[in-house]
């Protein structure tokens, strides 16, 4: 894992139930503003981290995993409408 990967993983571990962050917010919290795509790449190959708590800047859920992500977010009390969270950003 790269240093950035380690920082992204730490940010993800700190996201608790009901928290939602955008890829860009995770990148900024990891000390690399503007690295939203790096967060997406990291999540695409990581396991055991709360990937479902990360959405696009517009609140859109992960394409291809919308149903599973919506189910997990709703179980944590997050409002999901269609394929978007009601409010992107940390709660």
Image: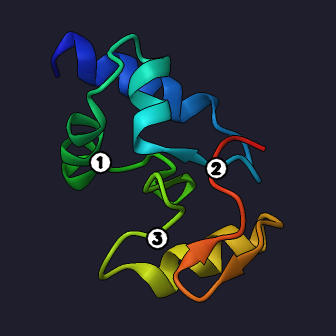
Mark 2 lies on a secondary structure that is: loop
The residue at 75%/50% (across/down) is 17
Q: Cβ–Cβ below 8 Å for labels 2 and 1? A: no
Disc number placed over residue 43 in the picture, else none: 1
Mark 3 lies on a secondary structure that is: loop
Q: Position of residue 6 (x, y in %)?
A: 32, 18
Pointer 2: what residue? 20
Q: Nearer the viewer, residue 10 or 24?
A: 24
Q: CA distance from mark 3 to mark 2?
A: 11 Å
Local packing at callout 1 (Cα closer than 10 Å; few below 14, some 14-19, many 20+) is: many
Closer to the N terminus: mark 3 or mark 1? 1
- Quarter where residue 23 is shown: top left
Task: Establish if 67 lies above or below 41.
Answer: below
Mark 1 lies on a secondary structure that is: helix
The residue at 59%/89% (across/down) is 82
Viewed as shown, does residue 29 lie left or right of 4? right
């Amino acid at each position: 894992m790269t240093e950035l990967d380690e920082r992204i993983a730490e940010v993800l571990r700190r996201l608790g139930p009901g928290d939602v962050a955008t890829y860009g917010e995770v990148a900024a919290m990891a000390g690399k503003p503007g690295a939203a795509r790096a967060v997406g790449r990291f999540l695409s190959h990581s396991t055991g981290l709360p990937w479902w708590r990360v959405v696009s800047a517009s609140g859109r859920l992960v394409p291809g995993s919308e149903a599973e992500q919506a189910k997990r977010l709703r179980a944590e009390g997050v409002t999901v409408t269609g394929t978007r969270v009601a409010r992107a950003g940390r709660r």
